[in-house]
Image (tube, rainbow, N blue to C red):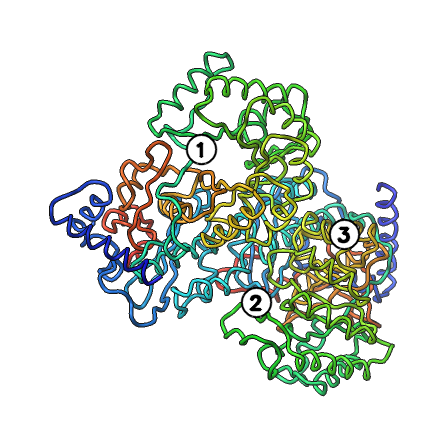
Amino acid sequence: MTKEKNDFSVQRRNTLKMLGLGSATGLLGLFDSNAAHAAAYDVPLYANGMAPAKAALKITDLKCAIIGGSPVVRITTNEGISGYGQAETAKPYLKSFVLFYKDYLIGEDPTNVERVMMKIRRMGSFKPWGSAVSIIETALWDIAGKAANLPIYKLLGGKVRDQVRCYASYGKGIRFAVEGKTPQHYRDWAEKVKSSGFGWEIIKENIGFHGPSMKNDPDFSYSNLSKSPESKKDYPYYRGPMKITGYKMVVDHVEGMRTALGDDIDLGLDIGPGFMLYDAMKMANLLEPYNICWLEDMLSGDYTPYVTADDYRQLTESTTVPIFTGEQIYLRQNFRELIDRHAIDILGPDPADMGGIAELKWVAQHAELYGIKIAPHGTFNGLLGLAAQVQVGATMPENFIAFEYTQAAPFWYDIVEGLPNPIVKDGLIDVWDRPGLGVNFIVKEAKKYLAEDDKNFFD
Amino acid sequence: MAKAVDNFTVQRRNAIKMLGIGSTTGLLGLFGSKAGHAATFDVSSYGNGMVPAKGVLAITDLRCAIIGGSPVIRITTNEGISGFGQAESSKKYLKPFVLFYKDYLIGEDPTNVERCMMKIRRMGAFKPWGAAVSAIEMALWDIAGKAAGLPVYKLLGGKIRDRVRIYNGGIERFNPLRASDTGIGPEYYAETVSRMKDAKEKVTIIKMAIAFHSSMGAKAPNFFYGDPMGPGNPPHANRGPITEQGLKRIINCVEAMKKVLGDEIGLALDCGPGFMLSDAIKLCKALEPYNLMWMEDLLTGDYRPYVMADDYLELTRSTTVPIHTGEQIYLRQNFRELIEKNAVRVIGPDVADVGGLAELKWIAEYADLHGIQIAPHGIFDGLIGNAAQVHVGAVMPQNFIAFEYSVASPAWWYDIITGLPDPIVKNGHIDVWDSPGLGVEFIVKEAKKYLAEEDKNFFD
């Protein structure tokens, strides 16, 4: 560890030297930018690694602000170092849930991440009730990294890759709607995906019970739940026996997409939850000719607070299509049956829901032991969430496929610094070497987006 | 169902008739008391079942107040009927978590309980994140019962017992004779069960906290091979390999208790979580001679957001002592492995954490199908929680042992709630009552005194 740290310091010293020569590309560009904006950043000299922490660090506060609808957690310390984490933008209600953990944290040394986590970990649960714990963990690693003047990946065992692959999911200019049902529509769709500039190798499409138009189509399933006409809010999800026309709908869409994409781009399908077990087997069987890279959450998944490992095992054994689940699952204990019984081919835990990045790495290694692949979920995790994915993605074993890329609202790119530009090249993100997450708020800019009740967030 | 309604209506009519004659005992006492305080109760004539609902009921609001430290939920409707639910008093932070579900519920017909629940059930999880959903379900049944003029148990399939067995739960907890600091030796255990044996409730089953569930983990010398976790942790933080001295301490305490209780009163132990699997097996084998009712949460339990059914299976197969778990587990799906594999002998879901009354009943039947017994957790569920336990306890199959009785604190809780029998517990049982809904109501005038400033409109 000491040696690695020295290597890193040398590397950084060289970087700084080169800065003096006026180089401003890639990693160097970051440092340059950092220097130029130092006054406005929320990164004390300390945190930039100028003076490694000597005294014991102590947590002084835990704050949560909802910035542009996205929950951001900040942990402050007695030495001026702050750590940040970010949860899914789909959870604007998260503030009180984050603050629930505050009393457990105050006074603890944030660099003993595991000791802090042992206090709060068992007070979380399945999505969305694990997200506060998870992003607190990320913020702790951010502090630990800054205090040690190391990127987080060095504290997670070191990186095994210099670039982390991500796959395309939700986002403007990332994934496109298929605008009709003719072969031409699918060709147009595939052309847009291919020419989007990100160089994706894998794209995931919402379909079936996960596809907003399909699940409501009366020809899709026999589901006919109705809410009260007086109620404004519908069921969060539907579930029900499939119609023959529903299977056909999915197959037609997939055939169109697959044909249009050719062999250049892999296609994953987020398709549930909603299938009855037999229907899931039949659906998977019908899709076997199309070389799908995975079928996600057919039986349980988004906001189902359970695993149903035995059902997944039967599904997995029944088909050659890789079966995928895991975004809602919290902690290694709840992955145990899926992995031990080989109930699944690919796991998709979300580091902002499953207990954090160290927990994700542990589960990835458990999966690796059983030959199970991993493709972490993260479509709504924001730019700090993206940074967390890069840090942990760099350390995961060879069973790692790609993580789900997240795209933020445009203003976000003006209020954080430290990400590469462009972020994604050929479907990959270069791993950076700045301390902690390596992505920080430009406080002066970020403050503009704080709500009135969050206005002291950066103070 | 129609017949059941008719029978009940006749029964209630008779009750009202008899009221005129001045009878005020048992069921009649409840009605008598109601009539006397009608103006101050939060029960419209509607809610008393006098005029069954005709129009479609719609939920107008979901509120939460922390009353005496205990989270209480109120669901209001367009027809003046309100339903109440209550979560564990250990969850004083619950308010924002309850309100999270509000938008899903507004406008829904609360008497279609399952439809409301299908909207929110998947948005809960392991304890404490299933509590809000569970307490909301409780309140929905309360409304559905009031709207139909029926006690909740009639909407859950009808009662199969007239009185519901309880186990000690909170009975000793607020006893002034109880040492402020719980003991860790045989004398303390003998003295405590002796007091409970003599308590007026005449309980037939006593459960005692021991090992990692008691202060042994923190205070007993050389109890386990680990340093006790410091203060500031969530409850029951200690876990680790146990020493021989620790093992003997537990056995000595059990022996002391059995000497007091003999074979008249069943003894159960709340043990963990905290045991390593092999230590749990060793302890159970050692305790086999004592005919224990059950050993609870040895491996997981309180605030462990997972089940570990395979480990429980191994433990259960290794011993004749009935192995018990389940208070932290949310929904039937998470009981599936435990039940289908016979991984435990007794399950202990909490009505205020598992997903509600109907969920608890379903799981009880599922357990019964597999020869597994049920003893629901509920020590902190409060008086409305007790009422919910009585209704669901009345309908559970013959695998039902007893539920964990909640004693309310502060004591003024008993002055702000009406509808419970007096005394509540007789000979270790609670008589099932027949008033509509959950059958317990706030005496609003009295209850208002204990509302915090920010909750002051709770009853409006």
- Front disc: 2 or 1: 1
| Residue at 43 percent of width and 33 percent of height | A170
Residue that mark 1 sits on: A169
Amino acid type at circle 1 is Ser
**Residue B310 in view of the camera:** yes
Spatial separation of the CA atoms under disc 3 and disc 2: 39 Å
Q: Nearer the viewer, residue A385 or A179?
A: A385
The percent coordinates of residue A40 (x first, y second) are 20, 52
Subunit bearing disc 3: B
Image quadrant where residue B66 sits: bottom right
Circles 3 and 1 in contact, beta carbons < 8 Å: no
Subunit bearing disc 1: A
| Residue extending farthest bottom | B187
Q: Are marks 3 and 2 on the same chain?
A: yes
Amino acid type at circle 2 is Gly
The percent coordinates of residue B23 (x first, y second) are 86, 65
Q: Residues within 10 Å of mark 3 (few under 14, many from 20)?
A: few
Residue that mark 2 sits on: B69
Spatial separation of the CA atoms under disc 2 and disc 1: 45 Å
| Residue at 59 percent of width and 64 percent of height | B70
Closer to the chain start, of discs 3 and 2, is: 2
Quadrant where the N terminus of chain B is found in the figure: top right
Q: How many marks on residues?
A: 3
Circles 2 and 1 in contact, beta carbons < 8 Å: no
Amino acid type at circle 3 is Lys
Q: Nearer the viewer, residue A105 or B87?
A: A105
At numbered mark 3, what does the secondary structure look like: helix, strand or loop? Answer: loop
Spatial separation of the CA atoms under disc 3 and disc 1: 39 Å
